[in-house]
Image: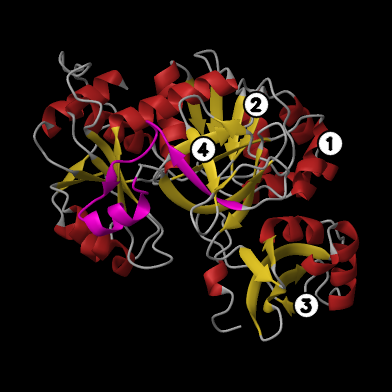
Amino acid sequence: LAAASGALAARLRGAGRVAVWATPELETAVAVTGALLAGVAAVPLNPKSGERELAPILADSAPSLLLAAPGAELPPGVRDVPLLEVDAYATGTVPEDAYGAYDDEDPALVVYTSGTTGPPKGAVLPRRALTTTLDALADAWQWTGDDVLTHALPLFHVHGLVLGVLGPLRHGGEVRHLGRFGPEGVTRALDSGATMLFGVPTMYHRLAEALPGDLELAKALAGARLLVSGSAALPVHDHERIAAATGRRVLERYGMTETLMNTSVRADGEARPGTVGVPLPGVELRLVEDDGTEVTALDGESVGEIQVRGPNLFTGYLNRPDATAAAFTADGWFRTGDVAVREADGYVRIVGRKATDLVKSGGYKIGAGEIENALLELDSVREAAVTGEPDPDLGERVVAWVVPADPQSPPSLEELASHVARRLAPHKRPRVLRLLSALPRNDMGKVMKRSLGAGS
């Protein structure tokens, strides 16, 4: 890797920003490492994106080159950017001045947000954000060079690229990318020496579904040092199924493109289902009411928006000083848009996105996540999402979007409402039921709730 990325770095000096066609291949690791060695900011592109999705990103980031594996199939719009094919087997040397030559504030990556609420914005991640996050995770997870990480995450996002590729490099370890996710590949990787597994909830859900009939998978997961889930909340039901079959708990952590990692359950801490642990070293975290008042109660019920401050943060949105200014408070706290509660020991439990997962009904602030977890306890429910919709009496009413386990015998609203009222509280029960064949999800497995109301 040093030889190949060193050879590439020599060609990238002074290139300005470069785009990376981020397929799950060795060339992507070489491309990003080479850009870091050359002091050039890399813009990872989702290879599944269409021309319409890529056009605004390319126009905004204006890359001087596109780095891609030889023979990569590129859509028409991308072909306008000068192509440099990455040779993963080139032999060169790491530039002598590559280490310590660049400022901590220099851009390392420009990662574009999903654009679900408007055009995608390019979050500029400085070199210090990458290093401080990875070092904080080494502390929290006891991550060393002896660890072998396996995963099947896409490499255009911070989860798969920063944590999943640069993390092992930072700590001197190894990463084995599965290429395509599947229980067989996970079993094979863990049986052949992998010690850590990173995944998203959709992946862990598939593992939970496969476990009852797959003793080899259960044995492999039981032997892993660390199972980590992120990018969205892992349903409590899947937590419990995996723990029952393997004796192992999945650790959750919380982060986002603009902040990298903020909190995590520690390797030596309690992996409590439904929580994302405590703030990582160097990260300040607070919960804030709509009027800016800080939520100080550690009661597991008082809801507030998460705001964070620390060296893990991005420097701003590329070419968007307006959006950057709006994202920060006057005293430098980043507004995440996520809402959460804190428990008595400081553990953070994410309620959801402020815009889509907080239902204000009858004077109560209700988090969608806890209702979704309750619904998933029912055998008749395969998938569930909760939103709010206008109600003339309550302000908003709770809506349950459900994929039934048996489409021929779906659960009734009364069944769901009764279960939630008993499990949580009567005011949190669904008042509307909408049945679906599948929930709309993005590439990271997150439910796209803004799509639920459209065309339903």
Name the mark on residue 245.
Answer: 1
Foreground: disc 1 or disc 4: 4
- Residue type at the position of mark 3: Arg
Q: Are marks 4 and 2 in contact (CB under 8 Å)?
A: no
Frontmost residue, 193 versus 326: 326
Q: Residues within 10 Å of mark 2 (few under 14, many from 20)?
A: many
Q: Residue at the location (71% across, 84% down)? A: 393
Q: Earlier in the sequence, mark 2 or mark 1?
A: 2
Which residue type carries mark 4? Leu
> In this figure, which residue is indicated by the disc labeled 2?
226
Quarter occupied by residue 358: bottom right
The image position of residue 115, as x and y in percent, is: 39, 63
In the rendering, at what x and y percent does residue 230 appear? 58, 42
How packed is label 1: few (under 14 Cα within 10 Å), some, or many (20 or more)?
some
Mark 4 sits on what residue? 285
Q: Which label sits in the foreground, 3 or 1?
A: 3
- Magenta stretch bounds: 304-330
Q: Secondary structure at mark 4?
A: strand
Mark 3 neighbour class, 10 Å CA radius: few under 14, some 14 to 19, many 20 or more: some
Name above or below for residue 404 compared with residue 379.
Answer: below
Q: CA distance from mark 1 to mark 4?
A: 35 Å
| Up-down relation of residue 389 to residue 259 (above or below) | below
**Who's the residue at 72% across and 73% down the image?**
362
Residue 410 appears in the picture as rendered? yes
Q: Which mark is residue 431?
A: 3
